[in-house]
Image (cartoon, grey):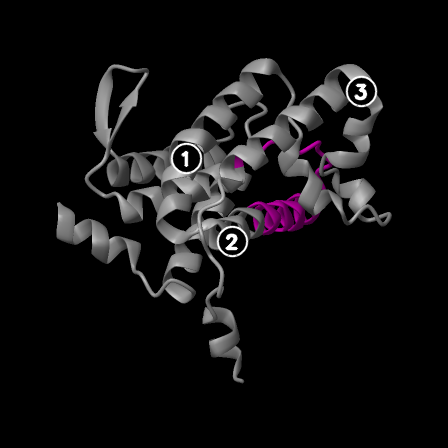
Amino acid sequence: MNKKSIINRRFRNNSYTNITLKLIIINVLVYGLTMYVYPKSEYYLAMIPSFVLHGYVWQFFTYMFVHGSLSHIFFNMLSLFIFGTMVEQRVGSNEFLLFYLLTGIVSGILSFLCYLAAGTNVILIGASGAIYGVLLMFAVFYPYAKVFIFGLIPIRAPILVVLYAGIELSSQVFGAGGNVAHLTHLSGLLFAYLYCRIRMHINPIEVWKRTM
């Protein structure tokens, strides 16, 4: 079987099993562990370039389950619940889990390579990279959906993705946003775009053009 067919192979059993809720529960449990039970565990689970270079390669996976504050995990999990549930129902639970984990892992790896090239040592935590990817896929499957910013301002999902991409790119280039991992967010968006193009055979830009 050629490489292309392996990349595009679908799951035989891809029914809906609410993986989104399970991911949220894992995130909450890890938050409790790192914040209250054993705070030092954050250094083993977060993605820290100098630690990765010393063999802590599992951090490419675990960092996305670590959060630094109650507001951090609340807004990430709220976004995962809203957008992740809809995407999972559309693509199936196994496909969604593959997409979510790969987006988070690749975002971590790309961030690590950039931090390494810049000689920067950081503590990277949070599910935001994966969730930005979920938001992009949500906008692909539900291009007419409106997201209410601050609960007041309705913005169509594709426009919101483009706005977020522009904000993250400008913040990364001009160094705005403090401790926000703009590079990881951009990596999540980029990988989600490629995932749609290569595995799902969907061109997000063409979808959005047809719905404008």
Residue in view at x 13 percent, y 45 percent: 212
Verify whether residue 127 appears in magenta. yes
Contact (Cβ within 8 Å) of mark 1 with mark 2: no
Query: Which mark, by number, is residue 170?
Result: 1
Query: Which mark, by number, is residue 39?
Result: 3
Most foreground residue, 56 or 94: 94
Closer to the eye: label 1 or 2: 2
Most foreground residue, 94 or 68: 94
Position in image of residue 52 (x %, y %): 79, 46
Position in image of residue 88 (x %, y %): 42, 45
Q: CA distance from mark 3 to mark 2?
A: 32 Å
- Density class for disc 2 (Cα within 10 Å; few <14, some 14-19, many ≥20) is many
Q: Amino acid at mark 2?
A: Asn
Position in image of residue 21 (x %, y %): 52, 33
Picture layout, residue 53 above or below residue 79 = below
Q: Which residues are magenta?
A: 104-128
Q: Which residue is mark 2?
A: 94
The secondary structure type at the circle numbered 1 is: helix
The secondary structure type at the circle numbered 2 is: helix
- Density class for disc 3 (Cα within 10 Å; few <14, some 14-19, many ≥20) is few
Q: Quadrant of residue 87?
A: top left
Q: CA distance from mark 1 to mark 2?
A: 34 Å
